[in-house]
Image (spheres, grey):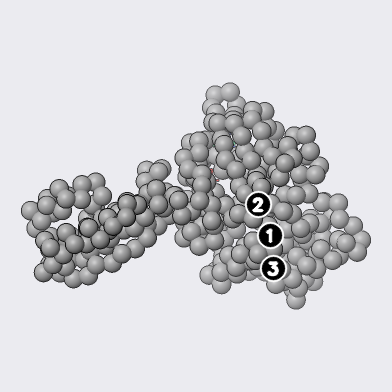
Amino acid sequence: MDMLSVKDVQFSYDKSKKVLKDINFSVRENDVMGFMGLNGAGKSTLIQLIMGLLKLSDGSIEIGDLDIKKHSKEVKKMLGYVPQDIAIIENLTAYQNVKFFGSIYGLKGKELAEHVDRALAFVQLTDRAKERPSKFSGGMKRRLNIACGIVHNPQLIILDEPTVGVDPQSRNYILESINELKQQGKTIIYVSHYMEEIESICNQVVIINDGKVLYSGGMDEIKHEAGSEMINVIFHRPLEEADKRQLMYEFKENAAFPSETELEIKVHGEAGESVKNLISLKENFNDQIKKIQLSDVSLESVFLELTGTHPSVQQSG
Ligand SMILES: Nc1ncnc2c1ncn2[C@@H]1O[C@H](COP(=O)(O)OP(=O)(O)OP(=O)(O)O)[C@@H](O)[C@H]1O
């Protein structure tokens, strides 16, 4: 079953520019979807439409099988949102913060107390529940932010760059807790500019650029489409021009030279192609080759290929 379906969505803040143009994709129940795009691609706008914070005029969005316009109340309870900007209130304690967000979702009395305890335990802040977050580290504030976003036990959780500005330990903790939410059966949308994080926790990817979906589908499929493997060859000495020309002739646009002593060959999905390439390299360049490594194509290189821009030149925010 689809937990989120976005159909033919278009959006403009003003008449001069369409920010979203015919957006279509779906996220299955219990998927962890990595949502990627360059700055200004339209990610936050789409999330605000899903959350009902912006008014949807063109197209439709369904959560489960509920249309967000017709069933806004039910949908609100199903959605959890952990915003990019930390939304906690500094002069309330950690407990009071989570309780406040729980009450916004209509929880009361014993049920509210149980939910608050569970959310604080989930982010391992039970011991610090009585403290004010002004004393907390950046990572602890992010964890409290997550507790506030999931206190009402939502089915679909959207996390917008939850690891920006946190120490490596908190980052690992946050990534592990997302895996745990998946184990609990939740569906996750994970917005991030950190490709390696998306690669490690997501099974589905949506890439948008300039308000359009460039890719939507499985993590394995996107890599397969882009070329399932990469052959990295390290030579003992810098290559002669004639050797480079021969390699370019043989491997065409699949060959790249990251440095004077390195060759990268992108291998497309066909069976046996990497073996054929290796045999050819060994036959022609065996004496010159220091090392050959086979590696999977990274999500980063796929993103670069699709958008024409490297994610690391991006500022997050
Ligand atoms: N409130 C607004 N009024 C007018 N234009 C806006 C508004 N918010 C965003 N935009 C414009 O809409 C486009 C998409 O912005 P959006 O914030 O959705 O992108 P994004 O992918 O979330 O970017 P980032 O990764 O930087 O958060 C951009 O051109 C942006 O300038």
Image-based side of 232 in relation to 178, left or right: left
Rendered residue at 22%/62% (across/down): 278
**Residue flagged by tag 1: what amino acid is it?**
Gly
Which is more toward the observer, 118 or 274?
A: 274
Point out residue 261 in the picture as x, y percentages from the top left corner. 18, 63
Circles 1 and 2, Cβ within 8 Å, touching? The answer is yes
Amino acid type at image mark 2: Glu
Residue at x 24% of width, y 46% of height? 253
Q: Is residue 178 visible?
A: yes
Judged from this view, the residue extending furthest toward the top is 15
Say the numbered circle drawn on residue 123.
3
x%, y% of residue 100? Answer: 82, 57
Q: Residue furthest right?
A: 109
The secondary structure type at the circle numbered 3 is loop
Q: Check whether the beta carbons of the residues at disc 3 and disc 2 lie within 8 A of each other.
A: no
The residue where tag 2 is placed is: 29
Sequence-earlier tag: 3 or 1: 3
Residue 237 figure quarter = bottom left
Q: Earlier in the sequence, mark 3 or mark 2?
A: 2
Residue at the spot 78% in from the left edge and 49% down from the top edge: 77
Question: What's the residue type where badge 3 is placed?
Answer: Val
Q: Is the residue marked 1 within 8 Å of ligand 1, measured from its CB?
A: no
Q: Position of residue 289 (x, y in %)?
A: 16, 68
